[in-house]
């Protein structure tokens, strides 16, 4: 059985640790693949089994995966007995985590590429997929060098540190011949120069910003209003985030990346801009949990005003981790089948899908299934 | 331009009055067709225009449509200046309302048929569609005569009053050569003997129980859980209904019709029974409005428990009326195109769709669009 | 330092186990008295310290306290490391649990009295308070013997098993010279014959039905509407209960005890009956947790209609256990100070306070503080 | 019967118009005093009857009260037939509205004083109370002249326009010998120099920021947590405001006045700062309505985490107007009884009560009743 390498940027974060623990627990028979879209009954096609994943990655943090897993056990994200039960798996993955890129610390592209290639070689892997689950970056201003690969390569060759970290990782992944998944709202592969590179290297990629909570529900509900010809008058939301994700988003610049990503779903599905804002608050007390409240005011027959409210209370890592496992395996399969460049068929997983403007959840899911069928 | 007759059972109820006022307001240029699915941008096909509908119906109540419209104006369902503005339209429709069937009052099938046929003749209509928007009936026990048309006709010929009112109206509609829409949870055309009659007379029908609030949202959200491989552990709900609908449902037997209809959506979409009940309370104070709260407990990756809650606050008549206009026109078009028997393609509009087990809103909508395309 | 005996009816249930674990954890310095009203900063008076409580009780269940604590650890009600840390305390309490009364199993009053008296003697306790935290009983029909102690004693002497279990325990407590707290909605001491007995024996008692969630919030909010002259038009609620409490309440008769208890708060505070029902559902999936949604429709200036909704998500045992510790110590102090009979000053803790019609939370709290001051 | 003058700053705004319409409707027997605290059953003392109020005021807007009332009728704040029914009362009040102060337009204090004094003289009123219900101002930086009346008068005499409008109105009111109510979050009388002036003129005043929705509920619920020794871990909120109030608050500076006012209640009642923010969004679509969602995370026995959420949907003007009528009459009575300076006894009505740090709703209400008793 051929193994698949999953190289996680932010490999010691909550999402990555949960994904690694989860895959190990499934292999050990201690958990079911609940939450993995590709493992649900009747999902078409055959992907690399969840038991055949090998993990490594980059991180600037040094806390061991075992310790991170224990923290998640105390936070009730994973069962507190898993870290001990899966100790050897966690140590093996830990041994494959390399120091992450520190912005301003000089040229690292070559080193990152070597790290990934070395991992592939050590484990004799046919394929490695790089998945970014690190902290959200602020939006990036356009630069001329982002538009053309040759210009970008020239700057990198000159030792200039011009790419945001997520894009640097995508650059390294593509150069290493790996598919890439941008699971955060960061820029990642979404630069023309990097699209050029992916084409050149024949590698596929997908993104952006994993759709795991409020936006997931929005993309399920907004089409209901549109199809029923009910006019949405305003759509407001407040997100309360604890833990790592929230802390990053305490930075207004990073938060603006995330808000842009969230706001567009409703407007895109409804085909017109809609009143109302989406707030993101960092509430450390909530730990690994997040709560979102949405308020929708809409108008029906003869102008009558009505409202829908929802409250979503979820555990971010538990929602994101199985999607990371889905995406790595789907992109690997696409790579194997010769697909390269952006994969709009994976829009179902993202708040800001690259390569498509489709935001209706059901339409995205239909496309995903067709894609899975096609790949098998 | 050919006109279409819409014959409403419960023609003086809130839903019927709102539909009649709405159609008149649209014709008068005083309202837009907000909430009419078939009038939304990009909806395929051409139906009889909303301005070409002629209304009549049966009702046991005697309050005039004008008075009922004024009540709805005070209840903020319609603008308070519409009843006066549309007085002549309301009077015209009022003149076409005939006494409804009173259970136990002896054989009335022939009279009901004559009422409908007379309406068609008076207005020179090519087609009349009968839509039941009257009060919900209790569930009906199966009887041998319901299984075969010949047996049923024999009992009716003998003067036996064995059909529940909704089924008697469907029987009359079919005999009069009219399509029929069962917009309530009542039995209506859902008896084998009546299916036989519809086939014999070459008329189409659709039903059951218009999907206008809590169940609409459920059918949009349940597929989200299923597709994401999130296991729903419990789904509970409390519906607070005022007005006419609530009053009928104060009767536990009628309420049980409605609850059966609501509960099945989640179980059908998820493919397994789910813990939790759906309560329906009559709260007269709420008037024409209804509020529903739903609580969903679900399980994600590694068994983590999460919850989704929603509150829907809507005006029942404003939600139902435009769908009545959609359905009458869609069934008329199907009739014109030679379709007869049950129309599963209209499942999108119903809590308990006849002729199909499909409960996912998006799948239902896709099928509706394909149907509309096919009819054009 | 003088110790206080706390004799729990339902000593192996979730509430009792949480109370015993909590008191032991506080003694061990492993927890703070969070949730104990009498331990909050500035609360007047001095009660027996939480570290000076000795536990025993009756229960029909045989699972050891240690095992029950481990279950609560897995259910995230208590920290999973507490059962091992506090093993000796749990074993000590376990050794003082005697078989509970089994209805229909013949005369047990004398045996129950002996059990309590033996506990007091073994530990050289000046005082024991009996607290009922067992399952809710159905409402009980009035009987002539309930009205007069002599008649009741005659029936008991004749071996007739006429008292509901909660009242039998109160009878035993009073005979043993102990104060009694009815923490459930069951009848308990609320019979004239038992009031007579409490007076005769000079013992105090309090009850009924610990106020720990939805009703707590109701009693905080209802006075807000009353004082602001806002008219509440309807107040509806749905309670979703898991665990032991919910299972008992799956029995409609027991549920009706609880609903009666809940419904009266709003009507009493507002001074008039209010539309709307309170539903209680047993949802096993929720485990030790409960969720309540309340919907209040109210009318303001010039008849404008407005609404308030709230959702309470709590852990029943964690809410009840500290109140059990408060009540045992407050009743003990009242006993010491010579109070006997019903203690209306403890209404703050109950949904259906015995001895008073006061349901406003703030008024109840003011009275509790005055009482605590008086006792010190 | 002696009449009382009510002079409204912002006399053509929604709150003022609703108050004027309401008082006229009550006088005409067309409405009850629902929402007036001082008119509720059992409220102690006797105030000037609601039928004995005479209205006037300042406003920069020129739309007539009749037209404003018609707008409120269309917005469903008042019954649409009231403006016609009460036309003569509205015209009478309209005739007593004078141009408001325009910042930067030079010295107006003398003119404002004359306007108020003229109103009193024309109607032979023993007493006039000035109530500010105009738009919220941004917070004001401290200035040395605000500290001492002599310095302030010197600057005003020199023609300097240094006071924020609300404080200028308070200044004018005090000079005219009138009591003053600051119903907005603006500075108003809360300057040492103005306290000096009120003492000198022997006039009472009260404020600040009428408590009509989210904060009202907060002040009812926060004491529940405190008294039950439950630790609030975070308290977050999102306010969606339409209409005039919202539009003003679209200005971040004005919004910050309001947020400061809202945030302090929870911290003051709980005695410690609490995590979480309160957002205020302007959502024009909501018209005269406002919706607030609050999320409270709290910790109980043994550290268990629980949550309370509430949603408040109210009509701002309908909530504020009856309190304006209460306050004018209570301050008038205090004036009559010889009280001057700040009235902390009226804290019950305000988010940021002047003269006291008491934020518990029940404690504020008890103090209000005692005050009302004392005044009678």
Image (cartoon, coloured by chain):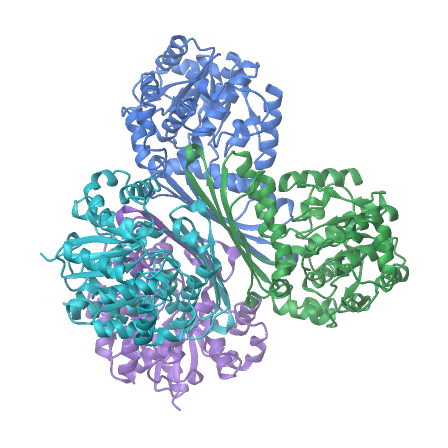
Chain colours: A cyan, B purple, C blue, D green
Pinpoint residue C153: horizontal percent, then vertical percent.
Answer: 43, 14
Q: Which quadrant does the C terminus of chain C fall into? A: top right
- Left or right: C306 with respect to B165? right
Seen in the picture, residue A254 relative to D233 is either above or below; the reply is below
**Residue that protrudes farthest toward the left in the picture:** A1
- Left or right: A324 with respect to C371? left
Question: Depth check: D103 or C186 in front?
Answer: D103
Q: Which residue lies at the image location 57% right of the left edge and 44% below the top edge?
A: D266
- Left or right: C60 with respect to D200? left
Q: Which residue lies at the image location 52% right of the left edge and 68% below the top edge?
A: B77
Question: Depth check: B40 or B189 in front?
Answer: B40
Pinpoint residue B100: horizontal percent, then vertical percent.
Answer: 41, 69
Tell how many labels: 0
**Residue that protrudes farthest toward the bottom in the picture:** B1
Q: Which residue lies at the image location 68% right of the left edge and 48% below the top edge?
A: D349
Pinpoint residue D127: horizontal percent, then vertical percent.
Answer: 86, 53
Seen in the picture, residue C320 relative to D296 is either above or below; the reply is above
Question: Depth check: C154 or A346 in front?
Answer: A346
Question: Depth check: D214 or B159 in front?
Answer: D214
Quadrant position of residue D375: top right
Pinpoint residue A182: horizontal percent, then vertical percent.
Answer: 31, 63
The answer to whether any part of residue A108 appears in the image is yes
Seen in the picture, residue B151 relative to C264 is either above or below; the reply is below
Quadrant position of residue D44: top right
Seen in the picture, residue C76 relative to C307 is either above or below; the reply is above
- Left or right: B91 with respect to A268? right
The answer to whether any part of residue B188 appears in the image is no
């Amino acid at each position: 059985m051929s193994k698949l390498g999953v190289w996680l940027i932010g490999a010691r974060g909550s999402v990555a640790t949960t994904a690694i623990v989860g895959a190990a627990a499934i292999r050990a028979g201690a958990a079911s693949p609940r939450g993995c879209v590709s493992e649900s009954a009747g999902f078409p096609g055959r992907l690399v089994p969840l038991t055949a994943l090998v993990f490594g990655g980059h991180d600037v943090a040094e806390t061991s995966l075992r310790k991170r897993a224990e923290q998640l056990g105390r936070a009730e994200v994973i069962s507190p007995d898993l870290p001990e039960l899966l100790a050897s798996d966690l140590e093996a993955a830990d041994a494959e985590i390399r120091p992450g890129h520190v912005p301003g610390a000089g040229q690292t592209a070559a080193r990152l590429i070597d790290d990934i290639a070395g991992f592939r070689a050590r484990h004799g892997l046919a394929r490695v997929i790089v998945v970014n689950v690190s902290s959200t970056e602020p939006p990036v201003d356009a630069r001329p060098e982002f538009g053309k690969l040759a210009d970008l390569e020239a700057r990198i060759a000159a030792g200039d540190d011009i790419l945001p970290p997520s894009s640097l990782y995508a650059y390294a992944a593509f150069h290493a011949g790996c598919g890439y998944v941008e699971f955060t709202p960061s820029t990642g592969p979404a630069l023309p120069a990097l699209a050029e590179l992916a084409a050149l290297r024949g590698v596929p990629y997908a993104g952006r910003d994993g759709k795991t909570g409020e936006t997931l529900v929005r993309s399920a509900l907004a089409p209901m209003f549109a199809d029923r010809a009910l006019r949405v008058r305003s759509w407001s939301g407040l997100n309360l985030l604890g833990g790592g994700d929230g802390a990053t988003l305490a930075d207004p610049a990073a938060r603006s990346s995330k808000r842009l990503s969230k706001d567009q779903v409703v407007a895109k599905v409804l085909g017109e801009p809609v009143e109302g804002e989406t707030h993101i608050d960092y509430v450390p007390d909530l730990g690994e949990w997040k709560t979102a409240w949405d308020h929708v005011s809409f108008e029906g027959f003869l102008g009558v005003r009505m409202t829908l409210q929802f409250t979503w209370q979820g555990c971010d890592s538990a929602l994101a981790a199985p999607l990371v496992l889905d995406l790595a395996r789907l992109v690997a399969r696409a790579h194997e089948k010769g697909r390269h460049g952006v994969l709009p068929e994976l829009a179902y997983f993202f708040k800001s899908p690259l390569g498509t403007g489709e935001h209706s959840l059901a339409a995205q899911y239909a496309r995903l299934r067709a894609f899975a069928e096609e790949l098998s």
